[in-house]
Image: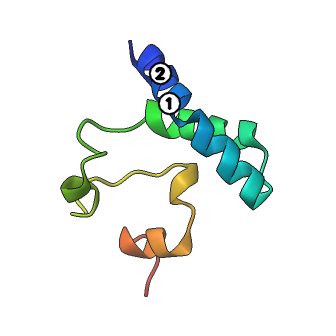
Amino acid sequence: MVRSNTLAQLRQLKPVILSQSRRQRVNPMLVTAILFDEIQHSKPGEDLPFIAHSGLVRTHGPAQLAITELIHQKRLPV
């Protein structure tokens, strides 16, 4: 069930993935693989803006590698 929902979401995102990958000169398969991993490991409600920005949900995956995100999650000192 989770896998099929993830694949459905990626199908919907395909046009955006392709256009942004071209724009940023990044392999779209890499972007898709990262999104697949992120979606598969997301927590319920994590995609709701008020939860995502509340700091209540903390995840560690390829999308959280930015220094600013690690600081936001208090994993690096300011």
Amino acid type, callout 1: Gln
**Mark 2–mark 1 CB contact (< 8 Å):** yes
In this image, 72 relative to 60: left or right? left
Q: Quadrant of the N terminus?
A: top left
Marks 2 and 1, Cα distance to the nearest angstrom?
A: 6 Å
The picture places residue 16, in percent across and down from the top left corner, at 58, 44
Q: Is residue 6 visible?
A: yes
Answer left or right for 58 relative to 67.
Answer: left
Q: Relative to 77, does residue 24 appear above or below in the rendering?
A: above
Which residue is label 2 attached to? 8
Crowd rating for badge 2 (residues with CA inside 10 Å; few <14, some 14–19, many 20+): few
Q: Position of residue 10 (x, y in %)?
A: 53, 30
**The one of 77 and 36 positioned closer to us in this rendering:** 36
- Please tell me in which quadrant of the rendered image residue 78 appears: bottom left
Q: Is residue 70 left or right of residue 55?
A: right
At horizontal 68% and vertical 48% (from top left) the residue drawn is 19
**For discs 2 and 1, the disc positioned in front in the rendered view:** 1
Circle 1 packing at 10 Å, graded few (<14), some (14-19), many (20+), is few
Residue 69, placed above or below residue 24: below
The residue under label 1 is: 12
Mark yes or no: residue 34 visible: no
Residue, x 46% and y 14% (percent of image)?
A: 4
Secondary element at image label 2: helix
Identify residue type, mark 2. Answer: Ala
Where residue 33 appears, as percent x and y from the top left, is 65, 35
